[in-house]
Amino acid sequence: MDSDRPQYRPAIGLLPRRQVHLDFHTSELIPDVGGAFCEKDFQEALQLGRVNSVTLFAKCHHSWSYYPTKIGRPHPNLATNLLGRQIAACRAIGVRCPVYYTVGWSANDAIEHPEWCVRDRSGAIATCNADLAAAPTADRPIVSWVHLCPAAPGYRQLILDQTRELCETFDLDGLFYDICFNTPTCYCDTCREGMAAENIDLDDLPAVQAYRLRVWHAFMSDVRSILHGHHPTATLFFNGSASPTTPPATLDLQTHLELEDLPTTWGGYDKFPLRSRFFAPSGRQIIAMSGKFHTTWGEFGGFKSPDAMRFEVASMAAFGAGCNFGDQLHPSGRTDRTTYRNIGHAFEYAERIEPYSEDALPTSNLAIWPSQQTGSADAAANDQGVANMLMEGQYSFEVVARPESVDLKRFDTIILTGNRCLNAHDAARINRFVKDGGALIVLNESVFGLDDGKPIIDIGADYRGPANFKIDYTLPLAPIATEAMTSPFLNYAAAPRFVPTSGTPLGQVFEPYFDRTYGQYCSHQNTPNRPEPAEHVAAVRNGRVICLAHPLGRIYHDHGARLHRDFFLRCLAELHRKPMVRSTMPSAGRVSLLHQPQLNRYVLHLLYAPPMQRGRCIVIEDQVPLHDVRVTLNLPHRPRCVEMPLRNEQLSIKRGPDGDVLHLPPFASHEIVTISY
């Protein structure tokens, strides 16, 4: 099953999997910067934390450097060669130490060189949460900076020259460039001149964005040439350049991927599982980045609980990634022992479970074909909502991130998540996949092609046009309906009108009497449904294809109603009858199946620690044990030996009507099962 998948062995070797990203954005108003730094204290903290890689700062968002640079500007109150001493201290204890350099945000550079700043279409300087007209005494929002452009000749040359200086001064393990690609589209004088030379119309946004991409690629290529000219095996990463819409050419310019998903405030604990599966087929090692903070970057004195951090490293490993926690060094240079005790609590466990995630890829016979790689509106919500429903239904799945490089025959079932995402070539492959016996779940507008907006999947129904109303209602039919589905339930976005021809309806649509307006309304919220069903349907089955007419991914992402999830999962179960793995954990449980082909084994990770919303943060606290968990497997290879390696116990396996069945002893938070073949 995995023969066509990349088994990546970069020249850099396997990266350390217990990392810290040590922020050091330090104002010029703070005295004696680095004055309290002590090599022994720093080393003891890293060892307490069981850290084997730490990213150190060469230049920060304030524009200051932390070594005696002749190219950039040392921090005016720098008391010591902080970077040099940190690198030497790491070398002495065998800790890897790539170096950080800011690109898109550099405050004092922006003040002194406004010609280096990103400009919007009107010519105004572009910022992130910063009011350039604010009084000096006004409160400044968090994460507020001015955007800079890597095309500006003076700024670009400064970065390249300082990169060369760093390469010549230090024996670099790697470079980490921050705030790349996530600056706005730029209309500064340099970019305008460049676009004029290429006859690009400034009103042609796709052409302007394509030019912007070429600017970044040229910058990345120059940096890579300098780094690898001096240090051929050094790692190189450009933060901000790893999203589902990132072109393969951008990924090719970096050695690995660091996925910056701080779950407490940046999208929750279900964001990383989808992102990691998206990038797993890229052939690059993945490092998952969270934070030691309660909230997010730059929070001095904020602490996530050690048990939550332990759960996070288990979750990172469960999806095949290395672990990285963000920290921020105090301006004095003194490390915080509480932080590294907490990290050590997590990394002690990470070290134990590393053998069960290294060189491992997520594997499944169920795949999501994501919408958001096309950049479609609402695509991210559709993808995440579908992924959430699958995870809560205890399905492990893969993501068809780069369709052109994937053999679809590896999958039994593919899900199109809701946006128009298929060109004619991909539609032909999908239709051939179904003809050859594959199953397809297609949601909402994924029925339509990218090229002409016409239906390109035979769903056994005619398309009669867009929805008549803004909302509507679903009544499931047999065999989908359950006792909880005997009344029409509300859809927060209405379905396009598909009227069955050869297909079998699985759910009816009931339309409202009218849309809610000032001229016509009923009660507090939505208009009730008419008593008679509409001609078009909520779901239709045509052989091995089921079409769900509503954008259920986006609806579930935004509203989280169990009825929508259950309707989706029951439709999926009609087609996907032999999933590679299912468990009986509650909906907050997460199951992930990894394959380690070089060891002839599968590794099953089971996670359970329900997150809770507290204020603006999502918190992991209660990690209660689960009892009587049953797992059903349908693997391509016949199991030879099933073990729980953290307990040094073997498990018996029984053949049941739906697959091989395991009964797990009670466990809390995380458990690992290896299945050798």
Image (cartoon, rainbow, N blue to C red):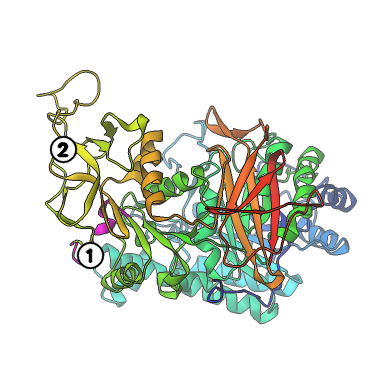
Q: Which residue is mark 2?
A: 469
374 is higher (above) or lower (below) than 306: below
Among all residues in the image, which is located at the extreme bottom?
229
Q: Position of residue 196 (x, y in %)?
A: 29, 73
Residue at 25% in and 31% down: 488
Three-letter amino acid code at the position of disc 1: Ile
Q: Amino acid at mark 2?
A: Phe
**Residue 290, how many percent across, how many down?**
62, 47
Note whether residue 61 is visible: no
Q: Nearer the viewer, residue 253 or 151?
A: 253
In the rendered image, residue 447 lying in the magenta stretch gets the answer yes
Q: Is residue 531 above or below residue 52?
A: above
Mark 1, other Cα within 10 Å: few <14 / some 14–19 / many ≥20: some
Q: Is residue 658 magenta?
A: no
Which of the labelled discs sits on residue 59, or is there none? none
Local SS, label 2: loop
Q: Which residue is mark 1?
A: 456
Q: Residue drawn at (80%, 54%), measured in percent from left and top? A: 80
In the rendered image, which quarter contains the C terminus? bottom right
Q: CA distance from mark 1 to mark 2?
A: 24 Å
Q: Secondary structure at mark 1?
A: loop
In the image, is residue 408 above or below residue 647? Answer: below
Of circles 1 and 2, which is in front? Answer: 1
Left or right side of 26 for 91? right
> In the image shown, does 103 or 21 lie closer to the viewer?
21
| Residue ranking furthest to the left | 519
Q: Bounds of the magenta span?
A: 442-454
Residue in the picture at 76% in, 72% down: 171
User: Dot 2: few (<14), some (14–19), or many (≥20) neighbours within 10 Å?
Assistant: some
